[in-house]
Amino acid sequence: MRIENWWPLLDSSTQQWLINNNGDVVPLSVLDQIMAVAGQPTADASWVGDNVREGFFLSDEAIDWIEKTANDEVSEGE
């Protein structure tokens, strides 16, 4: 599932956390909420970035999309 599809299903506090902390390690509580609506992250999901020792990161594509969304730059086609 693409970020455009699961984003509206998140509660507003989770969306705000992702906007305020865009590019940071995603805490398990936030990742759990994403997985509740988007399913398990798979390597081919466009929103999945690195899962390293420090934690889980969203992909560069997802980070850019969140930034555009925060700035009201996302068009209907994206």
Image (spheres, grey):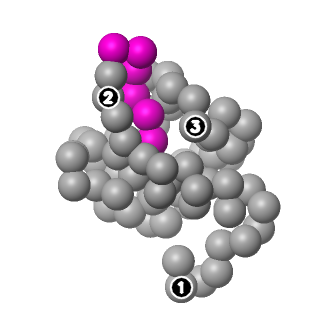
Distance (Cα) linking label 2 and label 1: 29 Å
Above or below, 12 against 54 in this view is: below
- Residue furthest to the bottom in view is 77
Above or below, 77 against 6 in this view is: below
- Visible residue check, residue 48: yes
**SS category of the residue bearing label 2:** strand
Q: Which residue is mark 3?
A: 23
The three-letter code of the residue at mark 2 reads Asn
Contact (Cβ within 8 Å) of mark 2 with mark 1: no
Question: Bounds of the magenta span?
Answer: 53-58
Marks 2 and 1, the one that precedes in the sequence: 2
Residue at horizontal 68 percent and vertical 62 percent from the top: 69
Above or below, 55 against 41 in this view is: above
- Visible residue check, residue 32: no
Residue at horizontal 74 percent and vertical 56 percent from the top: 70
In the rendered structure, the answer to whether residue 35 lies left or right of residue 12 reads left
**SS category of the residue bearing label 1:** loop
Pick the residue in front: 2 or 32. 2
Residue 61 place in picture, x, y as percent: 47, 57
Residue at horizontal 68 percent and vertical 63 percent from the top: 68
Q: Which residue is mark 1?
A: 77
Marks 2 and 3, the one that precedes in the sequence: 3
- Residue furthest to the right in view is 71
The three-letter code of the residue at mark 1 reads Gly
Residue 47 place in picture, x, y as percent: 39, 52
The three-letter code of the residue at mark 3 reads Gly
Q: Which residue is mark 2?
A: 51
Q: Dot 1, how many residues are within 10 Å of its Cα: few (below 14), some (14-19), or many (20+)?
A: few
Q: Main secondary structure of the magenta part?
A: strand
Q: Is 57 a magenta residue?
A: yes
Above or below, 52 against 38 in this view is: above
Pick the residue in front: 40 or 24. 24
